[in-house]
């Protein structure tokens, strides 16, 4: 699993996980694995841009290439791997509580 082997990019990964809203975590967690593609343009684009996957020296991107075993891994697939890693990690926790109008 990508999230368990991040090493040098752990700060980026943990920042991403902590920056996601409860609602987004809930959507990711409750999405089936085959539904993760629906996050490609919104969350995926945010990951690619915010965490500099386009940059030549991106540690997070390098980690994705290393984890996949593909030195030619494209940026889009790397962001899909990160979303899948988030999904995997969120599956290990109870569902986040959504707060609406001050009630649970």
Image (cartoon, rainbow, N blue to C red):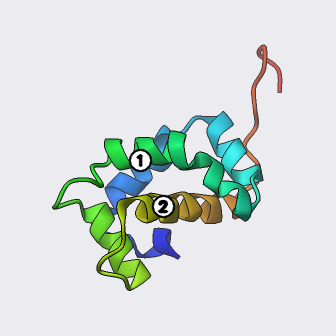
Q: In the rendered view of the protein, which quadrant contains the C terminus? A: top right
Going by the image, does 61 lie left or right of 2?
A: left
Q: Are marks 2 and 1 in contact (CB under 8 Å)?
A: yes
Looking at the picture, tell me which residue is in the foreground, 82 or 25: 82
Residue at 63% across, 59% down: 87
Going by the image, does 100 lie left or right of 21?
A: right
Residue 9: name its quadrant. Answer: bottom left
From the top left corner, tell me how far across and down residue 27 is, in percent. 71, 43
Q: CA distance from mark 2 to mark 1?
A: 8 Å
Looking at the picture, tell me which residue is in the foreground, 45 or 12: 45
Going by the image, does 6 lie left or right of 71?
A: right
Residue at 23% across, 59% down: 58
Instruction: Name the residue at the right extreme.
Output: 104
Q: Identify whether 22 is placed above or below 88.
A: above
Badge 2, how many Cα within 10 Å: few under 14, some, many 20+? many
Q: Disc number at residue 16? A: none
SS for dot 1: helix
Badge 1, how many Cα within 10 Å: few under 14, some, many 20+? many
From the top left corner, tell me how far across and down residue 37 is, in percent. 62, 55
SS for dot 2: helix
Mark 2 or mark 1: which comes first in sequence?
A: 1
Residue at 42% across, 64% down: 78
Instruction: Name the residue at the bottom extreme.
Output: 69
Residue 100: name its quadrant. Answer: top right
From the top left corner, tell me how far across and down residue 54 is, in percent. 26, 53
Q: Which residue is mark 2?
A: 82
Q: Which residue is mark 1?
A: 47
Residue at 67% across, 35% down: 23
Going by the image, does 47 lie left or right of 53?
A: right
Instruction: Name the residue at the top extreme.
Output: 101
């Amino acid at each position: 699993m990508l999230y368990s082997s991040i090493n040098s990019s752990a700060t980026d990964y943990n920042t991403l996980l902590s920056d996601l809203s409860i609602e987004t975590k809930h959507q990711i967690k409750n999405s089936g694995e085959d539904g993760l593609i629906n996050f490609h343009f919104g969350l995926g684009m945010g990951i690619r841009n915010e965490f500099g996957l386009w940059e030549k020296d991106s540690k997070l991107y390098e980690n994705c290439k290393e984890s996949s075993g593909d030195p030619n891994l494209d940026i889009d697939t790397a962001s899909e791997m990160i979303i899948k890693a988030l999904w995997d990690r969120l599956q290990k926790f109870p569902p986040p509580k959504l707060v609406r109008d001050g009630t649970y």
